[in-house]
Image (tube, helix red, strand yellow):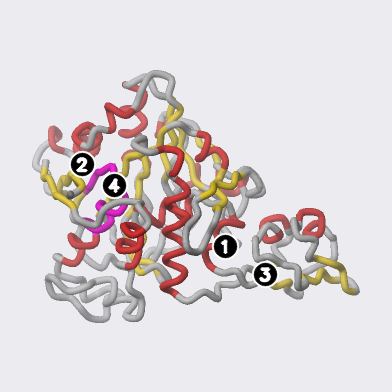
């Protein structure tokens, strides 16, 4: 059985078929209207963009979704989780300020912003999934608490996942810093020379694995690789480790995506924006040249199918020779392997189907 994926192209010739109108039509065609009831608290999961990045989804697109949810009597909020790396979204305060800086003010989007894992990325719950790599995963509390969710994703390349779409938005975006660490690696974090021996990390280590040696913290053998200490360090002197083989990392990421929506069966809608398709994630503080022309917008209730369709549509394009795309410029060739030749991003799709996250076969319905 194929999952339905609805598609609207970027070509427009009037206000009546503008991209903003197409977002609203896709919302209706994909059945998201029927999913929302009066007083439902609805998370709109998106990426607010790192400071310096210019390819993240424009706030005006998010506004269309907010208004559609409010039309149904729902109560939407925009949300994301804090980052594992030390950037402009590493804690709830900086993250909120970055969102406003990038245009997601209430006056623009008509909804509040809620950082899903709190100020210091401690606000999370364990969700049991019983999969190959994880028995349970850590999901940001305010995302887990929402009754419904719309996942709004900018489809683009990624240097460890191959590409980033709905699945990656769920996996990384719905996890606190500790959950992100678990996806990347179970190797214990390292204490850098910046450490001042304040002992804050010792108070929060669930395994009692951190001690003080001289004037520095020391992470010892009981460490379980949970990553709790990383966001708790007030000067970011504890560094995550990224030592996981790429196929294993992708599988761990997909299992996190499964956990992010486990309590919302039938109550999640996905929208992928195939525009400004950059070689890198929106987490970087710059935006590279787009690898293919703008394509359009997709909507589905299946995260695997929408990513599969997005991947295929990108590969059907002629690649931009003035971008990071080193090869595979012709129609039908794998554009993401043209950037990251040793990464098979399609493992997101095949493994997602294997664990029951969605279906890889889809019916593309143009509106």
Callout 1: SS: helix
Residue at label 1? 182
Q: Nearer the viewer, residue 362 or 50?
A: 362
Of the image marks 4 and 2, the number of the one nearer the N terminus: 2
In the image, residue 151 sits, relative to residue 28, either above or below, namely below
Quarter occupied by residue 287: bottom left
Of all residues, the one furthest to the right in this rendering is 214
Q: What's the CA distance linking mark 4 and mark 1?
A: 25 Å
Labels 4 and 1 touching (C-beta < 8 A): no
Residue at label 2? 19
Residue drawn where x is 80% and y is 61% of the image: 208
Residue at label 3? 189
Instruction: Based on the picture, tell me whether residue 302 belongs to the magenta stretch.
Output: yes
Residue at label 4? 302
Which quadrant is home to the C terminus? top left
Of the image marks 3 and 2, the number of the one nearer the N terminus: 2
- Does residue 59 appear anywhere in the picture? yes
Of the image marks 3 and 1, the number of the one nearer the N terminus: 1
Q: What's the CA distance linking mark 3 and mark 4?
A: 35 Å
Nearer to us: label 4 or label 2 = 4
């Amino acid at each position: 059985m194929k999952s339905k994926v609805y598609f609207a192209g970027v070509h427009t010739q009037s206000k009546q078929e503008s991209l903003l109108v197409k977002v609203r039509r896709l919302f209706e065609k994909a059945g998201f209207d029927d999913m929302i009831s009066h007083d439902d608290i609805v998370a709109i999961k998106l990426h607010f963009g790192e400071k310096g990045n210019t390819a993240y989804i424009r706030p005006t697109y998010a506004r269309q979704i907010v208004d559609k949810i409010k039309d149904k009597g729902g109560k939407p909020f925009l949300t994301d989780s804090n980052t594992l790396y030390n950037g402009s979204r590493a804690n709830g305060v900086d993250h909120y300020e970055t969102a406003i800086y990038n245009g997601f003010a209430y006056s623009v989007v008509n909804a509040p912003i809620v950082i899903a894992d709190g100020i210091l990325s401690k606000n999370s719950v364990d969700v049991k999934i019983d999969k190959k790599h994880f028995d349970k995963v850590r999901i940001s509390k305010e995302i887990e608490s929402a009754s419904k969710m719309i996942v709004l994703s900018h489809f683009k390349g990624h240097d460890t996942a191959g590409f980033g779409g709905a699945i990656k938005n769920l996996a990384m975006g719905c996890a606190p810093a500790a959950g992100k660490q678990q996806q990347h690696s179970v190797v214990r974090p390292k204490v850098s020379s910046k450490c001042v021996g304040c002992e804050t990390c010792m108070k929060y280590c669930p395994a009692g694995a951190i001690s003080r040696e001289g004037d520095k913290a020391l992470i010892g053998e009981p460490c379980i690789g949970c990553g709790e200490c990383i966001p708790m360090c007030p000067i970011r002197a504890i560094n995550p480790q990224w030592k996981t083989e790429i196929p294993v990392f992708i599988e761990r990421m997909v299992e996190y995506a499964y956990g992010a929506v486990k309590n919302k069966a039938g109550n999640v809608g996905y929208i992928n924006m195939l525009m400004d398709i950059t070689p890198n994630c929106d987490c970087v503080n710059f935006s590279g040249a787009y690898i293919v022309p703008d394509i359009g917008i997709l909507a589905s209730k299946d995260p695997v199918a929408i990513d599969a369709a997005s991947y295929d549509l990108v590969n059907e394009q002629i690649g931009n020779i003035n971008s990071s795309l080193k090869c595979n410029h012709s129609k039908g060739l794998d554009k993401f392997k043209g950037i990251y030749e040793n990464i098979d991003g399609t493992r997101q799709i095949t493994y997602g189907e294997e664990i029951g996250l969605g279906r890889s076969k889809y019916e593309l319905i143009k509106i």
